[in-house]
Image: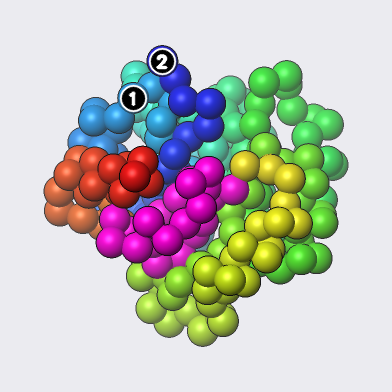
Amino acid sequence: MASPHPTVLLITDWTIGSDLLRARLQAALSVCEPGQVAVQHRHPGATGHDFYEEAVALKIRCDAHQAPLFINGRLDIALALGCHLHLSASAQPVAEYAAHLPRGTLVSTSVHNVNEAQRARGADFVLLAPLFAPKSKPSDTRAVLGIDEFNTLRASVTSHVFALGGIDADNAHLLPRDCGVATVSAVLHNSSPADALRKLLSALQR
């Protein structure tokens, strides 16, 4: 039975190499239940052609495992492939995009503060970040939210929330029970992605 919301959102990092990323994603998706894990296709700096070809390859894998696929910032590619759409905080308000999407298409967006939370109204999923220091971005100098500020910001959001930033199986127990986790490094940077995903899901299902 599919989950009402994905529990984990895996965000792609193509800097580890396309073959390795695809292999690790395949390994991770093979151990989850339908709908339990979603994928976000993110590749800053990629050409339009490469981004599209990567999206096609991801769609095949995600469809095989009934994993929702979100396309980062490209409405045209989301529409062409029948995928969901992820918007950066700077691309809000969400309602302007939602009007162009077919019924059943989901929209996720990133939120870092209360102002962005207001503009995110209408999104199906919100990524609140950064909860802790992002392990995939060691040079990121943004102030982290921490648990208390995260919970305050979360109270201003009406969408389903994924916590993003420095979360893994060791600290996921700190999150509220109804929050999901969005991650770049905890699973797809792990040499054993299937085991890493199992541990993360177990920590969230405590």
Residue 10, given in percent of the width and then of the height, sits at 40, 46
Depicted 100 relative to depicted 147: above or below = above
Q: Residue at x 53, y 32 (%)?
A: 5
N-terminal label among 2 and 1 = 2
| Residue toward you, 179 or 29 | 179
Q: Residue at x 59, y 59 (%)?
A: 128
Residue 164, given in percent of the width and then of the height, sits at 49, 59
Q: Amino acid at mark 2?
A: Met
Give yes or no for residue 8 being in the magenta stretch: no
Name the residue tied to disc 2.
1
Along the horizontal axis of the image, is 145 left or right of 199?
right
The stretch in magenta equals 161-184
Give yes or no for residue 173 being in the magenta stretch: yes
Q: Quadrant of the C terminus?
A: top left
**Picture quarter containing residue 102?**
top right
**Picture quarter containing residue 60?**
top left
Q: Quadrant of the N terminus?
A: top left
